Image (cartoon, rainbow, N blue to C red):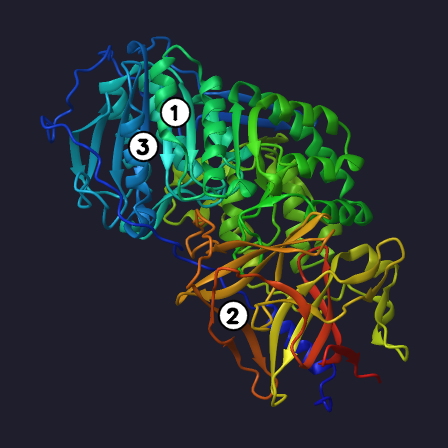
Amino acid sequence: MKTTGLKRAAALLLAALFALFCTGCGESGGKEPPETPSQNQGQQQGQSGQTQNNVPTETFDFSSEVQGLTMNVNRDTGRLSVKRVPLPSWINKGDSGKWTIFVYLCGTDLETSYGSATDDLIEIVDGAVGNGVRFVVETGGAEEWWNDTVGANKLQRFLVEDENIELVDEQRRTGMGRQETFADFLQWGVDNYASEHMGVILWNHGGGSITGICFDETDDYDSLSLRELDGAFLSVCGNLGRKFDFVGFDACLMGSLEAANILASYADYMYASQETEPGTGWDYVAMGKYLGANPDTDAKQLGIVTCDSFYESCAAVEEEDLCTLSVIDLSKLDALLVSFNDFAHGMYDSAADTANCVDMIRGISQVDNFGGNNRSEGYTNMVDMGGIISACESYSDGARDTLNALENAVVYSVSGNMHETASGLSMYYPLSVQGSEELAIFGDICPSPYYLSFVDRQNQGSVDVDSVDDYDDDFWFDDDGNWFWGLFFQNYQDEDYENENDWFDGYWDYLDDYEPTGESPLITFAVEPHLDEDGDFWFELDDSGWEYAADVYGLVYELSEDGEDLIELGQTYDLRGGWDTGIFMDDFDGYWLSLPDGQNLVTYIVEDTGDYVIYTSPIRLNGEETNLRLRQDYEDGTVTVEGAWDGLNEYGAASREIVKLKAGDVIVPLYNAYSLETDDEFYYHGVEFTVTGDFEIYYDIMEDGDYVFAFCIDDLYGDYYISDFAMFTVEDGEVWYDLP
């Protein structure tokens, strides 16, 4: 065994290796081309196909407005007030006794590669039954379409009713991730097809509150941000003179507080998922037929039908475990915002005490989160709102009131067994910040200055811990002691800055040059990590180290046969001890998740619920990089292969599907590796393994060889400490440490 010279210096190399991460991109899976939707013989290209419905001769000018609401907090009272832009007194009622659903069908790679948009367009046609419902669909955003009705070189608008689809308008192709494109479609739609009940569905990838929705592959994957949705709906609803019955996101991760806050000015209900959605998406046949039979139904009941049919469609493809979908009563949102601001005020004040802060952060780190949030799959930083409140309830008054307000707003939801505790709304929390731009966007959509300060103080501590004690939230309040939501966005609009980063005049730039060190000075010990004479690898935090430590886990690496490379195998919670004593001891027994041929897989922890743990493992599947999702139950140790998921792509769009593995699929494990001789970082890959019908992942003793175990201790502010390590050997099913 090679041990000479591999002491603290090699532990630092582990820190560098640990800092690597890869983000999956592209869409996995595939299917046969679907049948082409039937098309009316008498379609009218380039014409609206409909006379205008009660459109007033006057127009409502919102040119002086840049957002649909005003939120204010006075520092003396700490109370939040919410004022939404009033709509005109006249109302465009449109056709009575009818539902019109406007579908913004941005096909992107979901259509180009898999025909998913075509599948749902077929469902829309099949579901448009009876006189009580019609769909108005705009298509675009894809390089290719899997049918002969839709063209890729233009934006096309279709009227779907009576199980027929008719092309009624065409426009030059522009990016569907642009505010003006979305607004133009909606304005044209309500001018020509207004009805008593109207809903809007945005169909595509979603990325959560930061990256938004509708990533257009023909326009550099530009997406609609929440601010762009605000601007588009503001102009359309101003001229319409009323709210939409609902706005829904048939996309991943858009069920957030920040999105609901935007839409509350323009719709009665929001339908959205906290988690990723499968490529099959919503059941449009069920929605359409229900509306056709019940044209007088309200948006709440339609939302219930949408949720239930979505869950059933997920179950049909065995993806119900991850499923979430909620119906949010947006008339209840302002009460939730006011209550949450009060609660966040207490969070911020209590977090001035480091012991309180670390306890809250430890609690939040265990809360249900959505969209991966790990080094292999990427970070959405979308965390369950109810979970955040519950994790901090000991440190702020009013938790029960805020949870009640949340329950009142979420009038219906469905969720699978992997998200049994999901509250129905997520919100942004920085599990791992990817840079100043992300925080600038968050700062401009955050609904509370106290929650914003809670997050900002934590992030500033990652750069300079001394800044935490000196932190003051004065920056968010003007000279009169008032905070206004969207103040920097308004300044950006008024001053016509060339770059969105100028919104905050570089305020968030403190993170741009920051990189975690792997040697956090905040992690200090009463007893340093060491391997004692009894073969126990352990440490004890001192009072200061305990106060600043947020999480502890093990890192395992394999030493290459020549002893020159460390090959990362991932994370484990196989530890004894805990926070009550500050003592943590290795409880690793040499067992690891492996392919049937014995190859050890890399395992990063996605979620640990106490009943089971979800791992992700980077692999190549049939030549394409992706991640294998695995679930291990603690009670009986069984391992379930959930499938392959690409994670987030470089634009922040979440893959919509966990692809089930099938016989004949070829898996190649992927590993991050680090040379102990040259300091080079590189990919290390395993050998091909072909899936058979009885494919299983085994939790079994590791392959014979030499390995490294190190403790990783995350600090309160995002840095971490990687310990000196212990060398151990696996041979013939036996495991032993290289004693000092």
Is 232 situated above or below 277?
above
Q: Is residue 64 visible?
A: no
Q: In 3D space, how far apart are the residues under numbered discs 2 and 1 (Cα atoms)?
A: 42 Å
Is residue 737 shown left or right of residue 155?
A: right
Measuring 51% from the left and 39% from the top, which residue is drawn there? 444
Q: Is residue 505 visible?
A: yes
Kindly state the secondary structure of the residue where label 1 is placed: helix
Whole-percent x and y of residue 173? 20, 42
Quarter of the image holding residue 2?
bottom right
Residue underneath mark 2: 669
Whole-percent x and y of residue 195? 30, 14
Residue underneath mark 3: 123
Whole-percent x and y of residue 392? 74, 38
- Assess whether mark 3 and mark 2 are in contact (beta carbons under 8 angstroms): no
- Assess whether mark 1 and mark 3 are in contact (beta carbons under 8 angstroms): no
Kindly state the secondary structure of the residue where label 3 is placed: helix
- Residue type, numbered disc 2: Pro
Whole-percent x and y of residue 85? 44, 20
- Are there few (<14), some (14-19), or many (20+) residues within 10 Å of tag 1? many
Measuring 22% from the left and 19% from the top, which residue is drawn there? 192
**Residue in front for this viewpoint, 63 or 339:** 339
Q: In 3D space, how far apart are the residues under numbered discs 3 and 1 (Cα atoms)?
A: 10 Å
Tag count in the figure?
3
- Residue type, numbered disc 3: Glu
Q: Which mark is residue 287?
A: 1
- Residue type, numbered disc 1: Met
Which is more N-terminal, label 1 or label 3?
Answer: 3
Which is more N-terminal, label 3 or label 2?
Answer: 3
- Are there few (<14), some (14-19), or many (20+) residues within 10 Å of tag 3? many
Kindly state the secondary structure of the residue where label 2 is placed: strand
**Residue in front for this viewpoint, 191 or 707:** 707
Q: Quadrant of the N terminus?
A: bottom right
